[in-house]
Image (cartoon, rainbow, N blue to C red):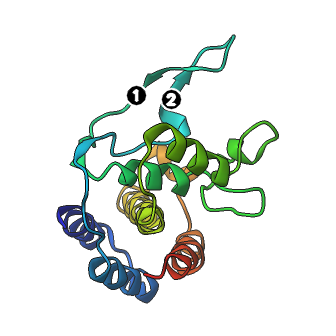
Amino acid sequence: MRSVSSWSAQWERSRTRELPALEDLTRRLVAAVPEQHELTLLRGDFHLRNVITSYDSGEATGVLDWELSTLGDPLADMGSLLASWPAKRENTSGDFVATTLDGFPPREELVAAHAAASGRELTALGYWHAMGLWKVAIIAEGLMRLAMDEPRNKAASGTPTAERIDALVAKAAHEVADTAGI
């Protein structure tokens, strides 16, 4: 699968240390690529921070940041959304935890709404959720690499820690993969 190989290459460019949990998850994802039943335009980085909503109604009025768009399985975008939508008991998305506030539906409601609206079979959604978390960990490692290489970079103050990335991969992504049978 092209996505796994391109993100694996990104990991190699971003890597600051050995991370066996990420290597293990990569092997698991490569071995469990689901059969593709549908090809659609993917947003590529679909999460709440890239959505503009109406102040009055809360309805989505725009989706930003399309530079990662591509063609692929539509469940990949849903997996990315789930990876950035922590539950109240989780801390997988760094400092941005709006989805843990009252009024935001839990992941299960998002999944049910997606299934009802799309009519899609969601058997492989656990794979895409695990892949979404895997990609977040690789992005976080890239930010850490950037902060190490450019310590005066203003973004460095919000850089994820190695412990945070390890927890994301070792705990959250592996739990999702385990639950999905990957």
- Quadrant in the picture for residue 34: bottom left
Dot 1 amino acid type = Leu
Which amino acid type corresponds to the residue marked 2 in the rendered image?
Val
- For the residue labelled by badge 2, is the local secondary structure a helix, a strand or a loop? strand
* Cβ–Cβ under 8 Å for marks 2 and 1: yes
Disc 1 crowd rating (10 Å Cα; few below 14, some 14-19, many 20+) is few
Query: Percent position (x, y) of residue 123?
Result: 44, 65
Q: Quadrant of the N terminus?
A: bottom left
Which image quadrant for residue 104?
top right
Q: Is residue 1 left or right of residue 146?
A: left
Q: Position of residue 127 (x, y in %)?
A: 42, 69
Residue 17 - label: none
At 48% from the left and 43% from the top, the residue drawn is 154
Residue underneath mark 2: 51
Between discs 2 and 1, the one toward the N terminus: 2
Indicate left or right for 49 with 128 as reference: right
Residue 129 at x, y percent in the picture = 47, 62
> Mark 2 and mark 1: span between their CA atoms?
6 Å
Residue 103 in view, yes or no: yes
Residue that extends furthest to the top in the rendered view of this protein: 56
Front one among 21 and 77: 77
Number of residue marks = 2
Residue identifier under label 1:
64
Residue 17 spot, x, y in % from top left: 39, 81
Q: Left or right: where does residue 165 sit relative to residue 119?
A: right
